[in-house]
Image (cartoon, rainbow, N blue to C red):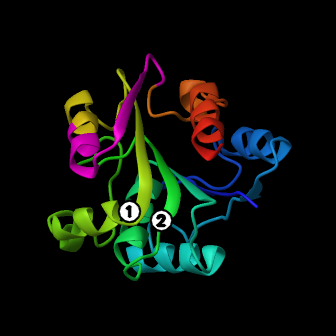
Amino acid sequence: MKRAILIHRAKGDSTSDWIPWLGEELSKKGFEVISPDMPEFDSASIDEWVSVIYNLIGEPDMDTYIVGHGFGSLVVLRYLSTLKEGSRIGAVFMVAPWTKAKKNCIEKTPDLKEWLNDWVWWKRARDHSRDFFVFYSDNDRCVTEKESLEFGRMIGAEVILERNRGHFTESDDVTQLPTLLERIVKISE
Protein backbone atom coordinates (compact mmCIF):
# COMPACT_ATOMS: atom_id res chain seq x y z
CA MET A 1 0.00 0.00 0.00
CA LYS A 2 1.19 3.52 -0.81
CA ARG A 3 1.98 5.63 2.26
CA ALA A 4 2.14 9.40 2.50
CA ILE A 5 3.91 10.92 5.51
CA LEU A 6 3.05 14.61 5.94
CA ILE A 7 5.44 16.65 8.11
CA HIS A 8 4.23 20.13 9.04
CA ARG A 9 6.24 23.33 9.37
CA ALA A 10 7.82 24.82 12.48
CA LYS A 11 5.15 26.45 14.63
CA GLY A 12 2.51 24.34 12.89
CA ASP A 13 0.77 21.03 13.53
CA SER A 14 -1.13 18.33 11.67
CA THR A 15 -4.15 20.64 11.30
CA SER A 16 -2.18 23.57 9.87
CA ASP A 17 -2.32 25.06 6.41
CA TRP A 18 -2.96 22.56 3.57
CA ILE A 19 -1.89 19.41 5.48
CA PRO A 20 -5.46 18.26 6.38
CA TRP A 21 -6.72 18.86 2.84
CA LEU A 22 -3.80 16.96 1.29
CA GLY A 23 -4.25 14.07 3.72
CA GLU A 24 -7.94 13.79 2.91
CA GLU A 25 -7.35 13.90 -0.85
CA LEU A 26 -4.57 11.30 -0.73
CA SER A 27 -6.75 9.02 1.43
CA LYS A 28 -9.45 9.19 -1.26
CA LYS A 29 -6.84 8.00 -3.74
CA GLY A 30 -5.94 4.94 -1.66
CA PHE A 31 -2.93 6.20 0.29
CA GLU A 32 -2.40 5.42 3.93
CA VAL A 33 -1.82 8.93 5.28
CA ILE A 34 0.21 9.63 8.41
CA SER A 35 0.31 13.21 9.63
CA PRO A 36 1.83 13.50 13.11
CA ASP A 37 2.01 16.45 15.43
CA MET A 38 5.75 16.95 15.69
CA PRO A 39 7.53 18.00 18.93
CA GLU A 40 7.32 21.65 19.97
CA PHE A 41 9.68 23.56 17.69
CA ASP A 42 11.14 25.92 20.29
CA SER A 43 12.26 23.17 22.64
CA ALA A 44 12.86 20.15 20.41
CA SER A 45 16.01 19.08 18.60
CA ILE A 46 16.30 17.97 15.00
CA ASP A 47 16.95 14.45 16.28
CA GLU A 48 13.63 14.42 18.14
CA TRP A 49 11.78 15.30 14.94
CA VAL A 50 13.78 12.71 12.98
CA SER A 51 12.99 9.99 15.54
CA VAL A 52 9.26 10.65 15.07
CA ILE A 53 9.67 9.98 11.34
CA TYR A 54 11.71 6.82 12.02
CA ASN A 55 9.02 5.48 14.32
CA LEU A 56 6.23 6.28 11.86
CA ILE A 57 7.83 4.79 8.78
CA GLY A 58 9.55 1.76 10.19
CA GLU A 59 11.05 0.07 7.13
CA PRO A 60 11.15 2.56 4.20
CA ASP A 61 10.17 1.33 0.75
CA MET A 62 9.39 2.64 -2.74
CA ASP A 63 5.70 3.01 -1.84
CA THR A 64 6.59 5.60 0.82
CA TYR A 65 6.20 9.26 -0.11
CA ILE A 66 7.15 12.05 2.28
CA VAL A 67 5.97 15.66 2.20
CA GLY A 68 7.71 18.30 4.29
CA HIS A 69 6.71 21.93 4.78
CA GLY A 70 9.39 24.52 5.60
CA PHE A 71 11.46 23.23 8.51
CA GLY A 72 9.72 19.86 8.09
CA SER A 73 11.50 19.53 4.72
CA LEU A 74 14.89 19.83 6.39
CA VAL A 75 13.96 17.19 8.92
CA VAL A 76 12.88 14.84 6.13
CA LEU A 77 16.25 15.25 4.43
CA ARG A 78 18.03 14.68 7.72
CA TYR A 79 15.99 11.49 8.20
CA LEU A 80 16.96 10.27 4.72
CA SER A 81 20.65 11.03 5.33
CA THR A 82 20.70 8.62 8.27
CA LEU A 83 19.12 5.62 6.51
CA LYS A 84 21.18 2.51 5.94
CA GLU A 85 22.69 1.86 2.53
CA GLY A 86 20.18 0.48 0.04
CA SER A 87 17.10 1.93 1.76
CA ARG A 88 15.00 4.06 -0.60
CA ILE A 89 11.62 5.72 -0.71
CA GLY A 90 9.50 6.69 -3.70
CA ALA A 91 9.76 10.49 -3.51
CA VAL A 92 10.17 13.54 -1.31
CA PHE A 93 8.06 16.67 -1.80
CA MET A 94 9.37 19.81 -0.07
CA VAL A 95 7.20 22.91 0.19
CA ALA A 96 9.02 26.16 1.00
CA PRO A 97 12.22 24.49 2.26
CA TRP A 98 15.05 26.67 3.52
CA THR A 99 18.59 26.60 4.78
CA LYS A 100 18.67 30.28 5.75
CA ALA A 101 15.24 31.47 6.82
CA LYS A 102 14.79 35.22 6.94
CA LYS A 103 15.01 36.61 10.47
CA ASN A 104 11.41 37.84 10.36
CA CYS A 105 10.25 34.26 9.93
CA ILE A 106 12.07 32.18 12.55
CA GLU A 107 13.50 33.64 15.72
CA LYS A 108 14.94 30.47 17.19
CA THR A 109 16.36 27.63 15.15
CA PRO A 110 17.29 24.49 17.10
CA ASP A 111 20.65 22.86 16.39
CA LEU A 112 20.70 23.53 12.65
CA LYS A 113 24.23 24.86 12.21
CA GLU A 114 25.83 21.51 12.98
CA TRP A 115 24.38 19.89 9.88
CA LEU A 116 23.20 22.64 7.53
CA ASN A 117 26.84 23.43 6.79
CA ASP A 118 27.79 19.76 6.43
CA TRP A 119 27.07 19.21 2.74
CA VAL A 120 27.96 15.52 3.01
CA TRP A 121 24.49 14.75 4.38
CA TRP A 122 22.86 16.27 1.27
CA LYS A 123 24.45 13.58 -0.89
CA ARG A 124 23.47 10.86 1.57
CA ALA A 125 19.88 12.12 1.50
CA ARG A 126 19.83 12.04 -2.33
CA ASP A 127 20.83 8.39 -2.28
CA HIS A 128 17.66 7.39 -0.40
CA SER A 129 14.86 8.68 -2.63
CA ARG A 130 14.05 8.10 -6.28
CA ASP A 131 12.73 11.65 -6.82
CA PHE A 132 12.78 15.06 -5.13
CA PHE A 133 10.48 18.03 -5.72
CA VAL A 134 10.72 21.57 -4.35
CA PHE A 135 7.68 23.84 -4.39
CA TYR A 136 8.39 27.52 -3.84
CA SER A 137 6.55 30.82 -4.09
CA ASP A 138 7.68 34.05 -5.69
CA ASN A 139 6.50 36.03 -2.66
CA ASP A 140 7.59 33.88 0.29
CA ARG A 141 8.22 36.05 3.35
CA CYS A 142 10.62 33.44 4.80
CA VAL A 143 12.56 32.09 1.83
CA THR A 144 14.03 33.97 -1.12
CA GLU A 145 13.57 32.71 -4.65
CA LYS A 146 17.36 32.37 -4.94
CA GLU A 147 17.41 30.21 -1.79
CA SER A 148 14.64 27.96 -3.14
CA LEU A 149 16.43 27.43 -6.45
CA GLU A 150 19.72 26.72 -4.69
CA PHE A 151 18.01 24.26 -2.36
CA GLY A 152 16.53 22.43 -5.34
CA ARG A 153 19.88 22.33 -7.13
CA MET A 154 21.71 21.00 -4.09
CA ILE A 155 19.31 18.09 -3.60
CA GLY A 156 18.78 17.46 -7.31
CA ALA A 157 15.07 18.28 -7.21
CA GLU A 158 12.58 19.31 -9.82
CA VAL A 159 11.70 22.87 -8.78
CA ILE A 160 8.11 24.08 -9.17
CA LEU A 161 7.09 27.73 -8.86
CA GLU A 162 3.70 28.53 -7.34
CA ARG A 163 2.87 32.21 -7.81
CA ASN A 164 1.69 34.37 -4.90
CA ARG A 165 1.52 31.57 -2.32
CA GLY A 166 3.66 33.22 0.37
CA HIS A 167 5.09 30.61 2.75
CA PHE A 168 2.18 28.29 1.90
CA THR A 169 0.39 28.92 5.18
CA GLU A 170 -3.19 29.61 6.19
CA SER A 171 -2.21 33.23 6.81
CA ASP A 172 -1.27 33.31 3.10
CA ASP A 173 -4.73 31.86 2.29
CA VAL A 174 -3.18 28.55 1.24
CA THR A 175 -5.32 25.65 2.44
CA GLN A 176 -5.02 23.55 -0.71
CA LEU A 177 -2.13 22.69 -3.03
CA PRO A 178 -3.59 20.95 -6.10
CA THR A 179 -0.25 20.93 -7.96
CA LEU A 180 1.37 19.06 -5.08
CA LEU A 181 -1.45 16.52 -4.98
CA GLU A 182 -1.18 15.97 -8.74
CA ARG A 183 2.58 15.40 -8.52
CA ILE A 184 2.28 12.91 -5.68
CA VAL A 185 -0.41 10.92 -7.46
CA LYS A 186 1.47 10.98 -10.80
CA ILE A 187 4.84 9.91 -9.37
CA SER A 188 3.21 7.10 -7.35
CA GLU A 189 1.54 5.49 -10.39
Question: Does residue 139 lie above or below 64 as drawn?
Answer: above
Is residue 168 something that shows in the picture?
yes
Q: Compare residues 119 and 86 and report the one nearer the observer.
A: 86
Residue pointed to by mark 1? 77
Which residue, as the protein is rendered here, is positioned at the far top?
163
Task: Report x, y in % for residue 48.
Answer: 48, 79
Q: Residue placed at 58% from the left, 69% from the top?
A: 61
Would residue 161 appear left or right of 156 to someone viewing this image?
A: right
Q: Residue at x 21, y 49 (%)?
A: 154
User: For the residue marked with disc 1, what is the amino acid?
Assistant: Leu
**Is 21 or 16 nearer to us in this picture?**
21
Tell which circle, 1 or 2, labels the residue nearer the N-terminal end. Answer: 2
Indicate the secondary structure of the residue bearing disc 1. Answer: helix
Mark 1 surroundings within 10 Å by alpha-carbon count, few (fewer than 14), some (14 through 19), many (20 or more): many
Residue 102 in view:
no
Find residue 20 and report its horizontal and vertical position in percent: 73, 44
Nearer to us of marks 1 and 2 is: 1
> In front here: 41 or 94?
94
Q: Is residue 3 magenta?
A: no
Estimate the spatial distance between the alpha carbons at disc 1 and disc 2, rounded to whole Å: 17 Å
Q: Which residues are magenta?
A: 150-165
**Residue at mark 2:** 41
* Rendered residue at 60%/41% (across/down): 184
